[in-house]
Amino acid sequence: EPEVTQTPSHQVTQMGQEVILRCVPISNHLYFYWYRQILGQKVEFLVSFYNNEISEKSEIFDDQFSVERPDGSNFTLKIRSTKLEDSAMYFCASRQFSSPLHFGNGTRLTVT
Amino acid sequence: DQQVKQNSPSLSVQEGRISILNCDYTNSMFDYFLWYKKYPAEGPTFLISISSIKDKNEDGRFTVFLNKSAKHLSLHIVPSQPGDSAVYFCAATYNTNAGKSTFGDGTTLTVKP
């Protein structure tokens, strides 16, 4: 069964550094998402992406965050200047029209 | 503003018995509800969904019930199996847009052999 893959599984970075989290969505999916889960808290929507542009974003997704689909397969989340409170599990997800989300296994981001 | 709430952080049941996981929501605009299951070190996996035009949806051992007037839904697992032990998230969305979902806090289900 096709799956969403995320790399790396764990990323450690220092406060103020830039990080890029990578995702390869399922190949025939058209809608792409990033969610995050701070330890012990709920899974939160960050951003949705369709037709090469952001379709919706949450208030969490401020100017420090950006997303890109640089080629036909990858979907990336960039955090320009990381803060301690950005430490979380970041989940990439994709879906076809009217289908549920298919999540990757996440990248654990630790900001020190 | 917690629009989707799962008031039980954990639930423990005996193998073979019924597991009932509950979820409440406050936003009356929600019209599509989903349950996801999550194992440690993995992402959430879709389990079952229900549209607001229905009050019940069944898929094998899993049944979701929706009570719109009470803004309440529940997931029933019968019979429960040890492999069902996981965190279960209720999620809600509107315009049947399953992409931007609002998740509950999750309920950790433990099924004892």
Image: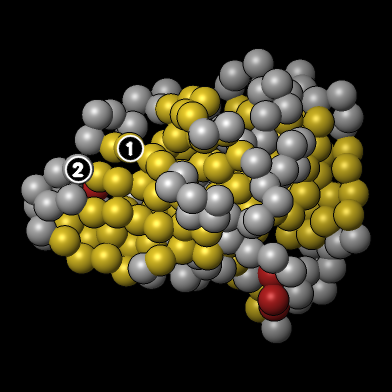
Residue at horizontal 49%, vertical 50%?
A71
Task: Judge by depth and name the residue closer to the eye, A81 or A44.
Answer: A81
Marking on residue A86: none
Q: What residue occupies the far top of the structure in this picture?
A: B29
- Amino acid at circle 1: Ser
Residue B94 at x, y percent in the picture: 66, 23
Residue A47 at x, y percent in the picture: 45, 34
Quote the CA–CA distance across marks 1 and 2. Answer: 8 Å
Q: Residues within 10 Å of mark 1 (few under 14, many from 20)?
A: some
Residue at horizontal 17%, vertical 57%?
A111
**Badge 1 vs badge 2, beta-carbon distance below 8 Å:** yes
Quadrant of the drawing holding the C terminus of chain A: bottom left
Marking on residue A66: 1
Task: Judge by depth and name the residue closer to the eye, A17 or B94.
Answer: A17
Q: Residues within 10 Å of mark 2 (few under 14, many from 20)?
A: some
Report which quarter residue A32 is drawn in: top right
Circle 2 residue: A80
**Above or below: residue B110 compared with residue B66:** below
Residue B104 at x, y percent in the picture: 53, 41
Describe residue A47's horizontal placement relative to residue A77 as left or right: right
Label 2 resides on the chain identified as A
Residue at horizontal 89%, vertical 54%?
B59
Label 1 resides on the chain identified as A
Residue at disc 2, secondary structure:
loop
